[in-house]
Image: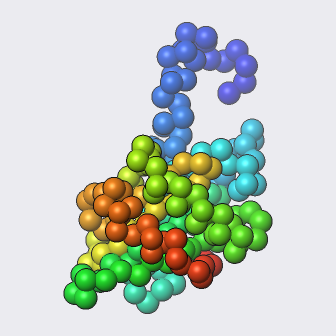
Amino acid sequence: MPVGVVSDKANAKFSPIELSVLRSSFLAVNRENVGPGKRGSLNVKKIKAPQIRVLQDYTMEIDSYKLGFAFAGQTYMIPQLMIDIDDNNNSYVPLFLATQLEGEGRELLINFKERLIDFLSDSHRVFSLLDMPFETSKHFILIGEYKNKWFAATSHKVVNMDWLSFFMLDDIKSINGVCQHSCR
């Protein structure tokens, strides 16, 4: 709104909730589809703090989920580790995934792997557990990072990072290959 239309008193009252409303309410859907408006930028690299969510990849024949965000009608996957868990064989397959948001994709994933190892090694790690909005029989864990903030999601209700670190950290360190994948 133009300067002077909203009083200082009203501005002080609504400012604390404005960011939450713009990112988490029904207003967020429009901003994600058409962009941030006149004062914002339609350059995805300039987004300060997008709403990271679990996205379903409809291009795959099997249930496939990734961490990412929507912006101006497009989806963007963040660098992440997907751990596909096979309960029948008591095994898991870790896979690094990313689209190229900045720099070379392979280099982005190698840097992500190093930060992930540091994150899992830190006993005081901080992350946001994201809601899984899809029904699936698949068992998986996703761990991603965007702008120095960590996110996790799972097909189960909880991610125990201490357990994950204890059992998988050595395996994650030994993974040589990385994979790039598009989530659209």
Q: Position of residue 131 (x, y in %)?
A: 35, 56
Q: In the image, what residue occupies the spot 66% across and 18% down?
A: 5
In what quadrant of the picture does the N terminus appear?
Answer: top right
Q: Position of residue 162 (x, y in %)?
A: 33, 56
Q: Which of 23/62 is in front?
A: 62
Q: Position of residue 178 (x, y in %)?
A: 60, 79
Q: Which of 151/177 is in front?
A: 177
Image vertical order of residue 6 relative to residue 18, above or below? above
Q: Position of residue 128 (x, y in %)?
A: 42, 49
| Residue, far top | 9
Q: In the image, what residue occupies the spot 69% across and 75% down?
A: 106
Figure disc tally: 0
User: In the rendered image, is residue 74 in sight?
Assistant: no
The answer to which image quadrant residue 82 occupies is bottom left
Q: From the viewer's perspective, tell me whether residue 93 is left or right of residue 47.
A: left
Q: In the image, what residue occupies the spot 34% across and 68% down?
A: 167
